[in-house]
Image: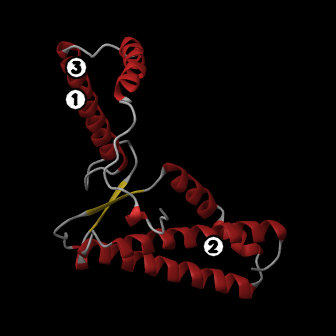
Amino acid sequence: MKISSLRDLPQDVAPPRDLWPGIAAQIAPQDATARAAAPERRSAPRLAQLRWLAAAAMVAAVAVGIWVGRELLPLPGKIGSGAPVATVNGPAGAPSALGVAYVADPRYQHQRAALIANLQARLATLPPQSRTKVLASLAAIDKAKSDLESALGKDPSNALLQELLVNTYQDEMRVLADVHTAGDAGKGI
């Protein structure tokens, strides 16, 4: 008989002998050693104790998160960690619906104060054209900061305004640092 496809094979063929007893005999010793090596199941009181411990850890983590958040971003008008807080009001000094608090990093304040302290002396060493450029840049940055703080007083959750304000602070620091280094070298900007 010639077989040309799988359909030509018989559908029901019994094995010449029963293979299951041999398979079962090989599996049984492996099951016994696996059960002996497996750790005992944890008892119910131990599991409940672990659940309570996990819940306590979660509560502690949330409490620490809230505490850290309050220290880094205190409420408007409240001084959290000794850092000065400036509250931005709406137009003409009228308080906005939500006051916005800006807490400046103490390192930023220290560096800015040091650069501002000797700004006039550094400007005097610059050529007149450079001095004019620097003063115009600082005036533009000051106006931009004022405008952004006013706009943030009206819309404190606006992420774009917040980013622009941070960028403006960075621009001011770049100009002040450039004046400081140009004054050291005695060259223009």
User: Which label's residue is closer to the chain start, 3 or 1?
Assistant: 3
User: Which label's residue is closer to the chain start, 1 or 2?
Assistant: 1
- Residue closest to the far front: 1
Q: Is residue 138 above or below residue 112?
A: below
Residue at 56%, 73% (x, y): give it: 171
Closer to us: 58 or 71:
58
- Mark 1 surroundings: few (<14), some (14-19) or many (≥20) residues within 10 A: few
Inspect the image, locate mark 2, and give the three-letter code of the amino acid beneath it. Answer: Val
Secondary structure under badge 3? Answer: helix
Tag 1 residue: 55
Residue 148: x and y in percent read 38, 77
Tag 3 residue: 47
- Give the position of the C terminus as an image quadrant: bottom right
Of badges 1 and 2, the one in the foreground is: 1
Q: Is residue 46 above or below residue 10?
A: above
Inspect the image, locate mark 3, and give the three-letter code of the amino acid beneath it. Answer: Leu
**Which numbered tag is attached to residue 122?**
none
- Mark 3 to mark 2: distance in Å? 61 Å
* Residue 103, quarter of the rendered image: bottom left
